[in-house]
Amino acid sequence: MLDSKRSQGFERLRIQRLFGEILLSIAVEEILFYYLHRILHHPSLYKHYHKKHHEFTSPIAISAIYCHPVEHILCNLLPVLVPWILIDTHVLSMWAWVALSSPLGVMLHSGYHLPLAQPPEFHHYHHMKFNQNYGILGILDWFHETDKEYRKSELFERAVFFIPINTKNINYHARLIWNVVNKHLMKRY
Ligand SMILES: [Zn+2]
Ligand SMILES: [Zn+2]
């Protein structure tokens, strides 16, 4: 016989619950990832567990999971799986969350921009400087001021932002979109 937790997976999942649980998972992941990642940058741990991931100073998609097994458990698995256990989410929310969060980690290392997601420049700057941008969304970096140098950098100006909105890069991307549209229209007509 199924216990209550396992049988929960067969309950109907309401859309409000799905969005609520995904939002909570994003918050828990941001907190866990930021602090665990920052702990791995402690000099006594860095060389053993995190240096491998930082061999890529300019990361590519597959380098998202290029890391020591201890880092993989602490930074890649726990922040994604703990929300499921902590919030006791519906099994379908958990599937949706894993399906959403895993490609985002790859995307952050890939150099490609996705609309409404953290731009890859954010994590690329971490790989360049090591002591900036420990988080995923950047909220805790803003809170702890571990993104100060990044905000003054050229990469910040190039990033397409969802959080926080930067007028400089809005102008930059409006110009890019205009150039693409213009080029396309010129070709056709
Ligand atoms: Zn990385
Ligand atoms: Zn790091």
Image: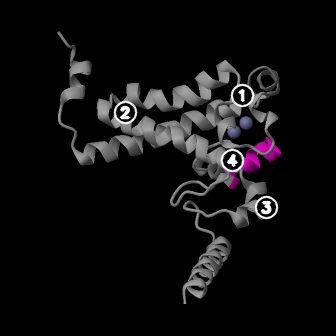
Q: CA distance from mark 1 to mark 4?
A: 16 Å
Q: Is residue 152 visible?
A: no
Label pair 1/2, CB-CB below 8 angstroms:
no
Disc number lying in front (1 or 4): 4
Image coordinates for residue 91, horizontal then vertical, percent:
31, 30
Residue 23 has which mark? none
* Residue for point 45% across, 42% down: 100
**Quadrant housing the N terminus:** top left
Q: Amino acid at mark 2?
A: Met
Q: Please identify the residue farthest to the front as the structure is shown.
A: 188
User: Is label 1 within 8 A of ligand 2 (CB to nearest ligand atom)?
Assistant: yes
Precedes in sequence: disc 1 or disc 4 = 1
Identify the residue under disc 3.
153
Identify the residue under disc 2.
94
Q: CA distance from mark 4 to mark 2?
A: 25 Å
- Read off the magenta span: 121-131
**Helix, strand, or loop for circle 3?**
loop
* Residue for point 22% across, 39% down: 13
Identify the residue under disc 4.
123
Q: Is residue 55 magenta?
A: no
